[in-house]
Amino acid sequence: MILLDDLGYTDLGPYGGDAATPNIDALAQEGLQFSNFHAYPVCAPTRAALMTGQDPHRVGLGSMEGFTAPGVPTTTPGYRGTLDGEYTGIAELLSDADYSTYQVGKWHLGDAPEQTPRALGFEQNFTLYDGAASHYADKLRHAPREVEPVDTVLYERNGHPVEDLRDDFYSTHAYTDEMLRMIDEGRDSRPFFGYLAYSAVHDPLHVPNTDLINQYLDRYLEANDYNKLRAERIDRLADKGLIAPDIATRWPVQTPQWEALDPGQRRDLAYRMAVYAAMIDDVDRQIGRLTQHLKEIGEYDNTLIVVTSDNGAASASRMVYTARPGAAQWQDEHYARVGDVEAYGLPGSYPTLGLPNAQVSSGPYFHTKTTVFEGGTRVPTIVKTPGAGNEGRTRVIDTFTHIVDLYPTFADYAGVDTESAGPLAGDSAKPLFDGVSDQVGDDEFGMELFGHRVYREGDWKLVYAPALAGGSDTYALYDIGSDPGETRDLIDMHPEIAQRLAEKWEQYAAGNGVVPAPFEVVGAAAPRIAELMYSIDWTE
């Protein structure tokens, strides 16, 4: 299980991206490419669902990093921001079935003894507990912690704190090294389950290969009008048959007009895109190391490999992490190269992708991480099933699928009964992967985040979001089949469908411990949240 962080829908080669991803391309060519796979809009809820098979509210992750629905305190069951409640980790199930279990990379589910990878069944782990960090050996947090260690993140290996990292540490490379080591040390008669959770491409955008940055910089400095970049990606998706030509799209309301940007701002965006593309290129190379090693030890054809993202592309500036008093000053001090465009990607820098670039990354799908629109939840997903593959012919899967379906899918491939884990939020996708079914469970799905709401029934999607987050301040109804860009609100034409889906959302909420925040309360908080989430931290 390879989980990338904040990767947008169009960022990989099979989805029309600019970065070179030959190793992921190769997985797609002999496997499955999903056009309608979804995660939750932010990372921790997605990771909770992946590890427990539950709706995030059932296991304490209805909130994240102290952000909840307005008026819902983090002491509320389901909103504590770390694992809580009743659940069985997927690694626990697989360990009981005599699997070796390995976890490497970002965790973001809590660091209390009962919340660790080892507590959830992983026999080996190399873990970043925090939600974001410098990708280098300095271990810097994105903002100061209120308790020790204040400045640095928490790393752990097999239950023991890692105080110091190698001088040449870079997260993407080190995580791959750790997973390869675990696989080699654990080689015996048992099968293994590996969960490799890269921090890439989460901000701060860091990559040590300056030649790679410069390679992409030449491309983006020459042409980085985000209107054209987005149109090019949409055209490539259409050429691949993943979307219909001439799809209707829209931009977040905070997106500046390209013509209004000065040369320095345009250059700034080009540098951000170059580092981002270099990070994607680099992580693809590391995935190539992993797949090549599996071939060398004779396990590649035996292995189910899933590559996906925890949510859509991130639009927030670094200021989203500086809401607490003193945090902005701390960040300026500890990331001493903040504001130096030519240092983007290097230690001490803190570039973020920026809202316009993030919408380019989402392609035709509206908006970005933290929103319940398709750009926040529809993610690129490649699956290579065990066996000889498709002989170079990618099989495209258009079925609605979700991250909650992976837990029962892994159990199904392992031949493990999930009854002991209780009712799960998803269904096994193995019949779909194997080509004996064209669906996964039913096609209904409910969700809540930060007071925003979604209920899907087939192609109908009911959404509540504030206007500043792309919504209408009340319910809106979209036909995702004919309008995947979510540009036409059909609620006035089909009020009876909206009413039915609203009632189903209420049932979903009642069954999963969701607190329905009133629309007016969520709307009142929207200006401050939008200022943090959708502003651009231009360099001077």
Image (tube, grey):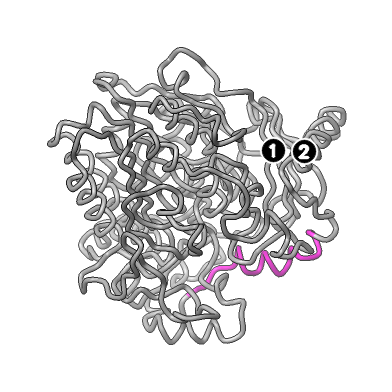
Q: Residue 523 magenta-drawn?
A: yes
Q: Position of residue 288 (x, y in %)?
A: 22, 43
Helix, strand or loop for the magenta stretch, by majority: helix
Name the foreground residue: 55 vs 16. 55
Name the foreground residue: 67 vs 221. 67
| On screen, residue 34 above or below 170 | above
Residue type, mark 1 in image: Gly
| On screen, residue 475 above or below 494 | below
Residue 349 shown left or right of residue 463 in the figure: left
Q: Position of residue 385 (x, y in %)?
A: 33, 26
Instruction: Determine the image quadrant of residue 388.
Output: top left
Residue 349 shown left or right of residue 292 in the figure: right
Q: Secondary structure at mark 1?
A: strand
Instruction: Determine the image quadrant of residue 277.
Output: bottom left
Instruction: Determine the image quadrant of residue 270.
Output: bottom left
Q: Provide the residue span drawn in magenta.
A: 522-538
Which residue does the numbered mark 1 point to in the structure image? 446
The reply to whether residue 222 is in sight is yes
Q: Are marks 2 and 1 in contact (CB under 8 Å)?
A: yes
Q: Residue 252 magenta-drawn?
A: no
Q: Position of residue 319 (x, y in %)?
A: 55, 73
Q: Position of residue 434 (x, y in %)?
A: 40, 18
The crowd level at tag 2 (other Cα within 10 Å; few <14, some 14-19, many 20+) is many
- The residue lying at 18 percent from left, 40 percent from top is 187
Residue type, mark 2 in image: Trp
Most extreme residue toward the left, as rendered?
A: 296
Which residue does the numbered mark 2 point to in the structure image? 505
